[in-house]
Image (spheres, rainbow, N blue to C red):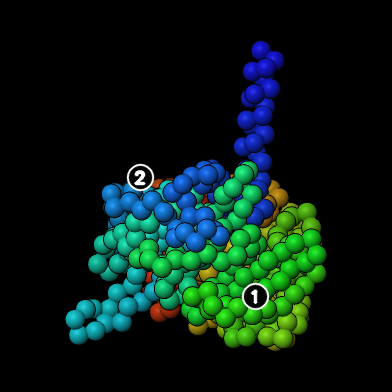
Amino acid sequence: MQRKYLIIVTIVGVIILIGVTVYFIFSASSAGVTVAPGGDASLPVAGRGESAGGEQSTSTPSGPVGTPIAVSARLVKISSGPVVQGEAVVNKIATASSSAETIVNFIERQSGNVYAYLVHAGTLTRTSNKTIPGIQSAVWASNASLAFVRYLSGENFSTINTYALYPDGTNGFFLSQNLSDVAVSSTNVLTLASGVSGSSASLLRTDGTRSSEVFTTPLSSLRIAFAGKNQYLAFTKPTSSLHGSAFIVDGAGRFSRVAGPANGLVAKASPSGKWVLVSYTSSGAMQMNLVNTTTGEPISLPVATVADKCVWTADDSAIYCGIPVSPPAGEYPDDWYQGAISFNDRIWKIDVAGRYAQLVLDFSKETEKTLDATALAVDQLNTVLVFVNKNDSSLWSYQL
């Protein structure tokens, strides 16, 4: 009996260790996330000169994404999931041979297969059958030319792999192992390597060439993003128990604080870099500000959520967010990232010039289900909003 008890305790301990590791590395993984099994021969392995998905399959992948379902005239369930958090929404311009279309590109989590959904046609197509199971997150180039996917491998899942996955599954390549964060624009990749002595960010082309260092800092726990031309956003990894700060970093590597110190701070820069959306906690409640990076002036917003539940429009004019209705008491954002707390969201639009919030979608009224919105994305013409329901990892689109 005692031996059986020890075995159970050991198994539970290993499960908890894996969960905690995934949370601290990716900072936004959903509960019950699938990780790549160690030593699986079908996984791409960095440093061996192998392409991702050494065992490619031409058969139907396991756990098919399903058929898109039109819930209403504007709301469509693209995939029942689970999908990888991170998708790209792009506009295809009309030509003599084809009409204009909005395309949603995403990755199935179980197989790593890439799919494209045509919003107006209502059709779903698998564009790649390259098998990369266990992907934790995907960061797409803004033009959907490729996605940098991240997954764990090795003994005790101690190695972070970052792989450039093209929508057709060809010509992929690896970035350096154990990167702590990655951001992508249409032409460049920003990578962050962190250690006990600090962090170093490098900029390279999306084909993996022309790498150059853009800044170093003694801060060892950061997240990064692009913030307009030749400048970047860097902020400390959020936790409710510690003060965090957000910085704009210029092309010369100089840091300028734009927000903080504040507990649970999360920041999201606008495409031009003129604004930064900042969420934080105060007296246990979520707060959200809009900060002008030129003047440093913070502007309180009428709604609040975790900034990772928001997306900027391409022209800086608006922000779409999943705003929780009566969020339960908790340690934010930690409890939400770890899946200990789930929200019941409605989608709101925050108008930057007018400083007002407008209700866009009451998900529960249209579906009779709850929504915990994450990985929001919007096309450049501001016509289609896409989001993942964290409750079941399903993927949805809503015509604005």
Please state if 324 lies on the left or on the right of 94 as rendered. right
Q: Residue furthest left?
A: 97
Nearer the viewer's eye, disc 1 or disc 2?
Answer: 1
Q: State the residue at coordinates (69%, 22%).
A: 6
Where, by quadrant of the figure, is residue 237 drawn? Answer: bottom right
Where is residue 153 shown, x and y percent of the image? 57, 49
User: Element at badge 2?
Assistant: loop
The answer to whether residue 109 of the structure is visible from this angle is no
Compute the Cα span from label 1 to label 2: 37 Å
The quadrant holding residue 266 is: bottom right
In terms of secondary structure, where does tag 1 sit?
A: strand
Which quarter of the image is occupied by the N terminus? top right
Q: Nearer the viewer, residue 126 or 96?
A: 126
Front residue (pair 213, 288):
213
Looking at the image, which residue is at 47% across and 51% down?
43
Report which residue position mark 2 lands on: 62
Residue 168 higher or lower than 186, as above or below: above
Amino acid type shown at disc 1: Ser
Q: Is residue 93 visible?
A: yes
* Amino acid type, label 2: Ser
Location of the C terminus (image quadrant): bottom left
Q: Which residue is mark 1?
A: 202
Tell me which label, 1 or 2, sits earlier in the chain.
2
Horizontal and vertical percent position of residue 197? 80, 65
Residue in the foreground of this view, choosing between 86 and 41 = 41
The spot of residue 395 in percent (x, y) is: 41, 56
Q: Position of residue 101 (x, y in %)?
A: 29, 74
Q: Is residue 42 left or right of residue 228?
A: left
The answer to whether 257 appears left or right of 62 in the picture is right
Report the residue at 19% width, 81% height from top. Answer: 97
For disc 2, the neighbor class at 10 Å (few under 14, some 14 to 19, many from 20) is few
